[in-house]
């Protein structure tokens, strides 16, 4: 914390610096008569020239301000300016930030047979989902007499994560997500000669809606059938109706 200097030291410091700001140049209208501070330092405390000490001991009279300055000050004091309350600035319209779009789709496929695009939650055990996908593929293979192969050896799986990159400067909204999901499905179908696609779950159906002439079936997610086994009957009815 700063401490104020004693008056004697303050005056001595100002005198040594040649600053006389402690005495007004002229008296303002309505101000009391200025009085020179007489608490000067003793000679033994601060040594000053004799001439300076004599000048300090003599009282000084305040000079009168020029007439124009007095009139200006009188006008300012007599007619105070009206303080206008500042108008509140209009609140800036804040644009709502777009919701960050994030989701995961699981792709299960058997070349030449079918592609399952599943939107089950991440917390569902991966082993249970893979087993369900294998059983569903096995049921589909038995209805296609021309398909020959092993489901256990042919089953492939991979994750589709959105956004695909972490660069927030790139446009990664719903339109871009739809284009990316559709492109991934069509590429897998063309590469593996897949005649049928199952869109399983709300997210899978939301982002995969433009598959052209490709045969697709919309069903519940795999997690729904794992939690509600009796719902598999409805699923099988959907699959057999399409074939």
Image: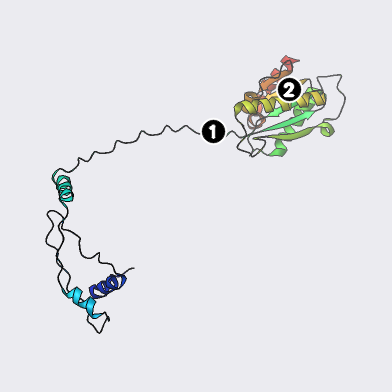
- The x, y position of residue 35, in whole percent, is 14, 66
Work out which quarter of the rendered image holds the N terminus and state it. bottom left
Which residue lies most toward the bottom here? 44
| On screen, residue 196 above or below 87 | above
Which residue, given by chain and number where applicable, does mark 2 sit on?
197
Is residue 201 among the parts visible in the rendering? no
Choose the circle earlier in sequence order: 1 or 2.
1
- The x, y position of residue 149, in whole percent, is 87, 27
Q: How many marks?
A: 2
At x 15%, y 43%, the residue is 79
Distance from Cα at disc 1 to Cα at disc 2: 29 Å
Q: Nearer the viewer, mark 1 or mark 2?
A: 1
Task: Name which quarter of the figure residue 103 lies in.
Answer: top right
Which residue, given by chain and number where applicable, does mark 1 sit on?
99
Mark 1 burial class by Cα count in 10 Å: few <14, some 14-19, many 20+:
few
- The x, y position of residue 122, in whole percent, is 64, 38
């Amino acid at each position: 914390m700063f401490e104020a200097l004693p008056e004697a030291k303050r005056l001595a410091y100002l005198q040594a610096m040649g600053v006389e700001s402690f005495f007004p140049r002229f008296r303002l209208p309505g101000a009391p008569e200025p009085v020179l501070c007489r608490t000067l330092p003793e000679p033994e405390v601060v040594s000053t020239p004799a001439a300076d000490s004599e000048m300090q001991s003599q009282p000084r009279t305040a000079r009168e301000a020029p007439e124009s300055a007095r009139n200006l000050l009188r006008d300012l004091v007599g007619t105070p300016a009206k303080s206008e309350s500042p108008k509140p600035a209009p609140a800036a319209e804040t644009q709502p930030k777009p919701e960050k779009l994030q989701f995961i789709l699981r792709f299960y496929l058997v070349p030449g047979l079918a592609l399952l695009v599943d939107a089950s939650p991440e917390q569902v055990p991966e082993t249970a989902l893979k087993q369900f996908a294998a059983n569903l593929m096995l049921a589909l293979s038995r209805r296609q007499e021309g398909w020959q192969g092993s489901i256990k050896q042919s089953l492939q799986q991979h994750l589709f994560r959105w956004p695909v990159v972490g660069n927030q400067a790139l446009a990664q909204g719903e339109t871009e997500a739809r284009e990316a999901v559709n492109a991934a499905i069509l590429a897998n179908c063309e590469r593996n000669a897949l005649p049928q696609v199952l869109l399983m779950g709300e997210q899978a159906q939301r982002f995969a809606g433009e598959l052209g002439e490709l045969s697709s079936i919309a069903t519940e997610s795999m997690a729904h059938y794992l939690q509600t086994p009796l719902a598999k009957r409805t699923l099988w009815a959907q699959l057999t109706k399409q074939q």
